[in-house]
Structure formats: C-alpha cells, structure tokens
Image (spheres, rainbow, N blue to C red):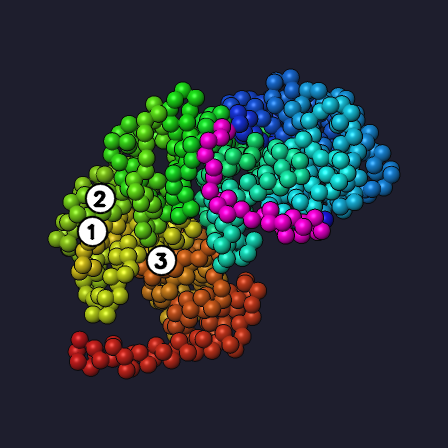
Amino acid sequence: MLRPFLAYLLRGRLAFPGGHRPPAGHTVPARFAGIGVAASPDPAVDDWIIATLRGAGIVNVRLDFTYGDADGPAGRLLGRLLDAGFHVVLHLLQPTDAARAMPDAAAGAAWREFVGATLDAFGERVAMIEACSTINRRRWAGYTPDGFFAAWDIAWQEIRQRGLLLAGPSITDFEPPWSVGILAGLQARGRLPDIHTDNLFAERATEPERDDPKVLGPRLAGLLRMNLVKKARLLQRIGADFGVLRLFSPAAFWTLPRIGRQLPATEQKQADYLTRYLVLAAASGALEGAWWGPLICHREGLVDDGAAQYPALERITHYAAVDGALADFRPRPALAALAAFNARIPGQRYLGCLAGGDGLEVHAFATADGGLTHVAWTINGRAAALVDVYDVATLAAACFLDRDGAALAEAPTLLTEMPVYIDWPTAMPVTLKPGAGLLPDVAIDVHGGKALHFFRADGWQGIVAAETPAAARALLAALPPASLQVQRAAVLRHARNAIWSLPDPRDPAVRLVVKQPVKMHLHKQWLDRFKPSKALRSWSGTCELQRRGIGVAQPVAWFEKIGDTTLKQNFYVCEYVEAEFSVRQMLSALAAGETTYAGLPAASCYRQLCAFLLRLHGSGMFFRDLSGGNILVKKQADGDLVFALIDTGRIRVFSQALPLRLRLADLVRVCNKLHWAGREQLLGGYFSAIGEKFSWRHRLAFMKYDLKVVAKRRIGRKAFGRLFGK
C-alpha cells in the first residue's frame, strides 16, 4: 500500500499547480445529484420516501444492501424503487464481522453466494453495482487490506460474469495514500472497477470552499490550496493514471453536531453547505456525480426521523435502516436546497468561476435555452454588496431565487453565506465589476431572523437589520444617519463615546441605543486610521457573537460617513437591553460576603456564569474587554440567568475554540471584582470543563492583572483625572 503511493508521489503526480481553480467548458452530468435511502420496517415509509423523492425531483438513489436484506425491508424498498423507475446504485457490503473474517474461505464463500444471488435477482435492473465499503476505516468496515482484496476479487468476478457496471473501492474522504495504494493493487490484479468511487467529504475544512487544514496544518493550508475542487481533480487524475477514467462520490454530508460546535443555526447551515458543496463539485469537472448521504436521519439526514439514538456503525459505512416513526418525520431546509440544485444545475454547461478564493464565490452556468445562471455566495459571516459585484443595468435584468429555489420578490442588497441563484433570460453578456469582493471587515448574521439592507447614498453607507426588507428601508428612512447626532435626547454616557437612547420608530415603547465616538487621543487618531470605524467594529463584533448563539444587545444598524478623516462620523445602533443587573454587580455582591444574589445561591450564579463563558470561548470568540460591566443579566422565572454582551468592538474571532492563554486574558478581567474563594468555585468549574486543573500558574495570571488594575487606579490616567478634578 505504501510503496505505490511513494512512487506516485516521487513522480510528481500529486503536484497540481492551479488545480484549485475549476476549469470551464464542461457540461454537468444530468444525473449529478442523488441521495442515499434506507428502508423501515413500516411499509408506509416506502410510499413516503418515493413521494418525497418525486416531490424533490430526485431520481438518483443509493441503497446499501447486505446479508438477509433481499427478504427484508431493504429488498422490499429496492423492488419499489426499481418499479417506480428510479436510477439505483446498489451498494453491496459484508456485515462487519464477516469483513473482519476475510480472507477466510467460509467468509468468502458466504460473500460469493450473497453477491451472486443479489445480482441474479436485481443486477439487470440497477444502474450500477458498488462493492465493499470504507476500506480506509477499519473500525467501521472491518477490512484488513488482504481481506478487502479477497472480497473485491469475489465481487469483481461475479459482476464481470454478468456484464454489469462495477463501482468502487469507496474510499472515505480525501486520502491519496489509500486511493493510490488500492487502485495500484487492483490494477496489478487485473481487477479494476469501471467507476472510481470516493466519498469526497469536505466537512473537516469547516466550509466547502476552504482549503483543507489537515493536509499541512491550519497555518500552511494556503500553500497547497487543497480545496474541494483540487481534491476532486486530483482523485480523477489518480483514477485515470491507473486506468479508471470515471469518478463518482456516492455519499458525503455535514453532521449537525459538527456544525453545532460553533454555529447554532445547524439546519440552515447544513442547507447552505449542501448547495455550496454541490456547486463546487459540479464546477470541478472531475465528478460525474456527487450525492448526499442519508435521506432520513436525525444527525445528518435531509429529513429528521425524530429518533435520538444513532447506530453503532457509521452510516457512511452502512446506512442500514430508517429509525423513528413516520409520524415524526420532518423535512429540513437541506431537502429543498437539494431539490433546487437538482432542478437548476445538472445538464448545464459550466462557464467558469467569476470570483473565488477570496471569500466571494460566483459560478456561471449556461442553460439549455440560451440563458445564464450565476450561483453566488460568500464564506460564513461575511457579505458582498450587490452594487459592488454587478452594475445597475445588469441587476435590473436579473431574476433572483433563494437557496431553496423560491423566487425573491425583489433583488437582495447583499450576497451572503446563503447561496442565491441569479438568472438572466438570455445569454446577455454579464461580467463582474473590477475588484468585486467582500465588504471589508463587515460581519453579518444572515440566519439571525432579520432581513439585512445595505445602502450607500449621500456620502454614507451601512446596513440596517429589520423583520423584512421593506421594514429595513422604512427604518433607514426614519433614522437617516446624517440626522442621528441631532437626535440625542436621553444621554446615557459622554466620554470617549457618546451613548444615548431614542424611541424605536417601529414601536415608541421600545428604546434604541446609539453609540458615536466623540473623543480620541492623538495616538488613537493615527492608529485608528488603519482600522474599521468604531461603529463597524461594534456591528461586526455583535454579529459574530449573535451568529454563534451568544447573547447580545440586538444589532439594528451600522452607519459611517465614507472617507471621514475625523473618525467620528459613524454610528452603531442596537436595541436597549432590559437587564436587571450586570455580572460586575453580581460578583461584587458575592465578594462582599453575600451568599445569594437575585434570589439564587452563589453556587448557581457561578455555575451559570461558567457555562456562559465556556460557550463564548468554545465558539472561538476572544472578547478582549470582558469586564463584568459588559455582561448584562436578566433572571427568568425558572431561575435561569440570560446573559447579554455589550461593548463588542474589540472582539477577535477564531475558527476554533480559544487556546488557554486567550481564555485567561478574558477571565482575569471578568473575575477582577471577585474574591479568591469565589474565583476557586467559578474557575474550578471552568477549568475542569476544558480538562485543565486551576493551578498556581493560572492563579499567577489573575494576581498580575489585579496588580495592574490597582496600579492603574493609583498612578494611571484615572488617578491623574481625580487629582485634577477631571
């Protein structure tokens, strides 16, 4: 296995300069999109599956099939699918125990009998036979290399005798040593498949278009540019070098728990990723099909089965059965996303990537009737203004459809991580503006339940968030940025920043809070010229928190004067937080000897604050100004504390949970008002949750910060202010 890979590597066949850019000019296969299905003991589920597939326009399905299935629910569903005219990939596999026993003669004889009987019963009616499963995952599939080759030899012989189409070897993920080693071994045996299959996952790169961080590590991932497109093209090259020209990815998916490690809108993100993954796979030109994994499954299916228990064997190895009751089935947004992609992209000619690699993706397809379709999106949390991507005349002729195929009543103002289809009725020349790209430093929360309206007019630009696009425009009309400064009424603070409240134009009973920088020291005036405006930093920090499910004062708008050299003509608007107290007040009271606060025992206060801090840092957020006064708290009737962060302009964002040194930098601030006995309770729970012990080295960081605060108060700027009455 290793020798052929090293030889392949030394011949330079894994070098692919420019391979990360998709080639243009190929036609996406008509059967490009499909889905995995499995049977339920309830025959009514068969009817439901067939009706659901037809409703989504999906005719391509993959069915896992093993010992005893012919006489069970799987055999029943297979017959129903074939009778209904579905294009079926029949995936034959051994039970794990039988795979572990290979190449034992008795295990081989049982495998041969199963393969022969299955092919005699169904072989002529299915589209292709896929043999064996996930050889590079021994814990799941059970195969040793010798055991796999023995099982493959038997399947190859039985399939070839009947003149059927053979696919394999079903490597999981992008692992060239396995792909090269297995194909070299099959070539040497004269046992190559007709179609090279690889379950081409991309979820370890967190987003479909990202470079894989596990090839050279996160810091060097950009050197090889090993993105999904390059992986597909390399796998196609590997197969072709060993005599197999066709490449097919029969299954891939994003599990909801993996998405949920950082992002709470798991089902929406699953649908985003599905569309983005399939468009990139189609753009690669290397795959004749890229299919999703399970149709019905609570963890990664396009339909939630309502069952919380996941089987011991991974469904990528064997999607054995549908769990849950029919009455509990619930389609997820990803099902509509797959239907929309399947209705629009297969069969179209790929014209090329008009923007890609810098966070904005725009892919062009020519339709059979001479029209033009663009599929456009951004990486997570970012946005591009439509007016920066297309000229006004081009936008006026376009028709917009959302990720799930629904027509939009009006053109959006932003491209976001949720893909959109943009149609032009004829093949009019459509080009992107020079320099089209992301809005610099702007973060958004597209799944936060609000419509986002970008504007640029009268020397100002910004974003307004409201319930609908019309409501956002109305709010902008009621709060034009040029007039905000003269609307100061209830001033809450006037120091470096002026902060005041005003009635929400949508509901006078609701208050909004406006923040504007008004004072800057000379060194800050120079340094901040190279940073986003303060208003934008507050907007983006808040949106980054919000899209990770961290409580915040809800963002309403960000406005800034274009080209402002004073750095003061910018406004951040958010909803007023109806808090009962701050964490600073809570910890100060406990430090003063109180055993309860707000009717809660101290232990409960520490436990709930600890959980909030763990969620904040676990989602990759480094707050950098996490004083207790910036954490507002409201107590619910059941005793749960709801935390909301304010003053978010200094946040830094990481793609993974924070390292300990950054966690400490936040924790020393929030604990400054807390006595050591309280710190032991709060931090003991925190450190235990991340697998650390609260040691003397950690305590030293808190002592250093305490001394810094005391020194600052006694001899720092605040002390001079008190001395001179300022």
Which residue occupies 40% across, 47% down? 359
Judge left or right: residue 344 versus residue 694: left
x, y percent for residue 97: 78, 42
Residue reaching furthest left? Answer: 486
**Which residue type does callout 2 highlight?**
Arg
Q: Which residues are magenta?
A: 2-28
Tell me which secondary structure the magenta stretch mostly adopts: loop
Q: Are marks 2 and 1 in contact (CB under 8 Å)?
A: yes
Which residue occupies 75% across, 46% down? 145
Q: Earlier in the sequence, mark 3 or mark 1?
A: 1
**Which residue type does callout 1 highlight?**
Ile
Q: CA distance from mark 2 to mark 3?
A: 29 Å
For label 3, the SS is strand
Q: Are marks 2 and 3 in contact (CB under 8 Å)?
A: no
Q: Judge by depth and name the residue closer to the eye, 556 or 285.
A: 285
x, y percent for residue 296: 58, 33
Please say whether residue 498 is visible from this viewpoint.
no
Which residue occupies 79% across, 30% down? 157
What residue is shown with label 1? 562
What residue is shown with label 3? 645
What residue is shown with label 2? 456
Q: Is residue 109 above or below residue 677?
A: above
For label 2, the SS is strand
Q: Residues within 10 Å of mark 3 (few under 14, many from 20)?
A: many
Q: Is residue 541 above or below residue 360?
A: below
x, y percent for residue 89: 65, 28
Q: Judge by depth and name the residue closer to the eye, 90 or 156.
A: 156
Which residue occupies 35% across, 25% down? 427
x, y percent for residue 382: 37, 47
For label 1, the SS is loop
Judge left or right: residue 500 versus residue 17: left
Judge left or right: residue 711 versus residue 298: left
